[in-house]
Image (cartoon, grey):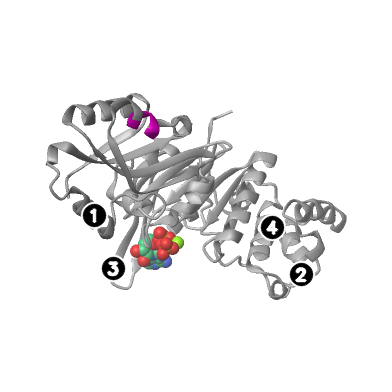
Amino acid sequence: MESSVIKLQDIFQTYQGPAGPVEALRGIDLHVPRGEIFGVIGRSGAGKSSLVRTINLLNRPSAGTVRVDGVDLTALDGAALRAARRDIGMIFQHFNLLSSRTVFDNVALPLELEGLRRADIVSRVLPLLELVGLCELRDRYPAQISGGQKQRVGIARALASRPKVLLSDEATSALDPETTRAILTLLREIRRELGLTIVLITHQMQVIKQVADQVAVIDVGRIVEQGQTLNVFSRPSHEVTRSLLDDVVPQTLPEPVLARVRAMLGGVPASQASLLRLVFAGEESDQPILSDVIRRFAIDLNLLHGQIDEVQGQPFGALAVLARGSQDQLKATVAHLRRSGVLVQEVAHV
Ligand SMILES: Nc1ncnc2c1ncn2[C@@H]1O[C@H](COP(=O)(O)OP(=O)(O)OP(=O)(O)O)[C@@H](O)[C@H]1O
Ligand SMILES: [Mg+2]
């Protein structure tokens, strides 16, 4: 079996806008490994929806090929394309439920369209309602349930035709943080139980942080950075990535903190102090590294700013510290931190 379930090759998408052509995708290559939750993040207008809609050919790309589970979708149309699309479920920001149908009947809809018999429909829909935790609400209408519950209906409906791939375009953007967490947890469970591959489009790093194994950053129609989530969080290389990361992993020090540093450094020679940004990822964050360097090298350490968190269930932290001591002590401190696996960035003096 091929290891990449989705393969996009050299995808271009040009729309005819009122003011002339809009190049929304400009040469996208993307391989999504089977069973992964693959995040795509970008700012508004970057091309995220255009990208995800090419995967099921809701938008036919202007150029390039789309392969899902070995099938070249761009070579299909009509009945063959409709059949291939059953392998690809999709969920949306605004749920797209039919208001005149109950929860049960919304989930049943794709199966009715496939022409299944009522008894078969019932035996497929009930376990799905169970999976998403909606059995009790099966006879309610969309207007009678919450946003999080509506998205659960959307997920159950997307799973009805037993897809191999689930596409999610900002599926949690209309939900509060707690409901978002619950929906993301559900997506993780579904991935595990059904062995599904999930492509998750978002503009929020919080979402990437909670569920994505891998993340690709899209900007102006191109993938500008891609990697394992923990690696991208530790060493973002593109300006857009850093700016999107800033609210979950502070990239720079806020002005009030800088002002405090200037006050602390009043009269201290520049060679006797280092402003350091430390990034801890994975195992080493469990070690008492900071107290260790304070003891070993007799330096003073002020914790200025930062965050310790989890990314994909792994400990992760980014801290800004002010270290004071002799030049030799400071050098030894930085060397020791690096040996211990901490990413150390020396911030230029303020
Ligand atoms: N049908 C269309 N006709 C013309 N231009 C379009 C069309 N759809 C999208 N665009 C343009 O293509 C670009 C990418 O749009 P897209 O919707 O893919 O971005 P996005 O990353 O999903 O943005 P958002 O986060 O706001 O949803 C934008 O400049 C948008 O204005
Ligand atoms: Mg969009």
Mark 3 or mark 2, which is nearer to you?
2
The type of residue carrying mark 2 is: Thr
Q: Which numbered disc, 3 or 4, marks the residue closer to the eye?
A: 4
User: Splitting the image into four quadrants, where does ligand 1 fall?
Assistant: bottom left
In this rendered view, identify the residue nearer to me: 278 or 130. Answer: 278
Crowding near the residue tagged with mark 1, few <14, some 14–19, many ≥20 C-alpha atoms within 10 Å: some
Q: CA distance from mark 3 to mark 2?
A: 43 Å
Q: Is residue 113 left or right of residue 289?
A: right
Looking at marks 1 and 4 on the same chain, the residue that comes earlier in the sequence is marked by 4
Pointer 4 residue Cβ closer than 8 Å to ligand 2:
no
| 190 with respect to 64 (left or right) | right
Q: Residue 193: image x %, image y %?
A: 70, 40
Q: Is residue 319 visible?
A: yes
- Residue 291 on the magenta segment: yes
> Which residue is label 2 attached to?
102
Comes first in the chain, label 2 or label 4:
2
Above or below, comparing residue 327 to residue 67 in the picture: above
Does 345 sit above or below residue 134? above
Q: Which residue is mark 4?
A: 157
Range drawn in magenta? 290-294
